[in-house]
Image (spheres, rainbow, N blue to C red):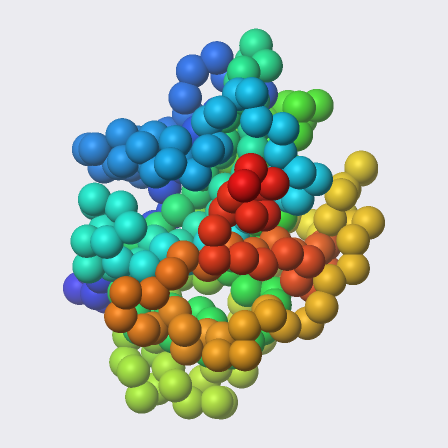
Amino acid sequence: MQRLIAHRLVTPPAIWGKLPRHADFVRSGMRHGESEAWQSWLALQGCLDREARPALGAALPTAFVLPPGSLPFAARRFVIGVLAPSVDKVGRSHVLLVYQTAHLRWLRFQFDDAVPHDWLFWLARTVARHVRADTPSDSQAIDQAVRRLWRVYAPGTCDLWARAAASPATRQARRARQTAARRQSESPAAPFFADDLAAQLHGVTRLPWADWPHRLYRPHGHGMFWQQDAKGGFVNAATRLAILWGEA
């Protein structure tokens, strides 16, 4: 029962896209019709235009929150996740996506703390490692890495009850547990690695929107996209992916 309720808050991460060691798409945890929905959405963003010459910002994984109705499979739920430019085995350009659908309550758990080292930050660090052209990563490796990281951040018993989850003491205890669990894991999400672009950048401690995160909760809101350096500083943020990826 607890797992079912947690699933209603936020679904386990799904993975879709291309990796340097694979000629075909990699996918994990997807449901029927979701890959087609992403193909259409990415085409509208200009992400699948092979002639496009993306800006330097496109080299960084991008965290995102899409409002309900942005994709056909999430008419009443938010879609959150990370996407990054990638290539397949023969060098064809595409993206790699790790995403979830989420209830408004989960977004409040996730973002009201205003902590830059959150689930999406560490997910972006993991994705950055696996899309590198010189990495030995395969679909099984990234699937295991994402699932291992999600075990640290998945909703716990206290998160299932709104009042307990909103308690400052509960939030602080949850962050402490997550930090300890992540450090003890063998996840490949360590802050730095060779030729890490994010390690060369220096962001700021807050996103540029004065009404963050409350703007997420408004009806008919916009999508939100941002990128972070290797220490969690925010280096880019926009309401359209094309702005970050230099395609508009």
Q: Position of residue 172 (x, y in %)?
A: 53, 82
In front here: 12 or 151? 12
Outermost residue toward the front in this view: 248
Residue appearing at x 54%, y 57% in the figure = 238
Residue appearing at x 54%, y 41% in the figure = 248
Where is 189 relative to 120, above or below?
A: above
Residue appearing at x 35%, y 78% in the figure = 158
In front here: 149 or 214? 214
Does residue 36 show up? yes
Where is 206 relative to 196, above or below?
A: below
Q: Position of residue 119 (x, y in %)?
A: 51, 60
Q: Quadrant of the N terminus?
A: bottom left
Relative placement, left or right, of 92 versus 80 is right
Residue appearing at x 58%, y 58% in the figure = 237
User: Could you say which quadrant of the image residue 209 lies in?
Assistant: bottom right
User: Could you say which quadrant of the image residue 129 lies in?
Assistant: top right
Q: Position of residue 147 (x, y in %)?
A: 45, 46
Does residue 3 show up? no
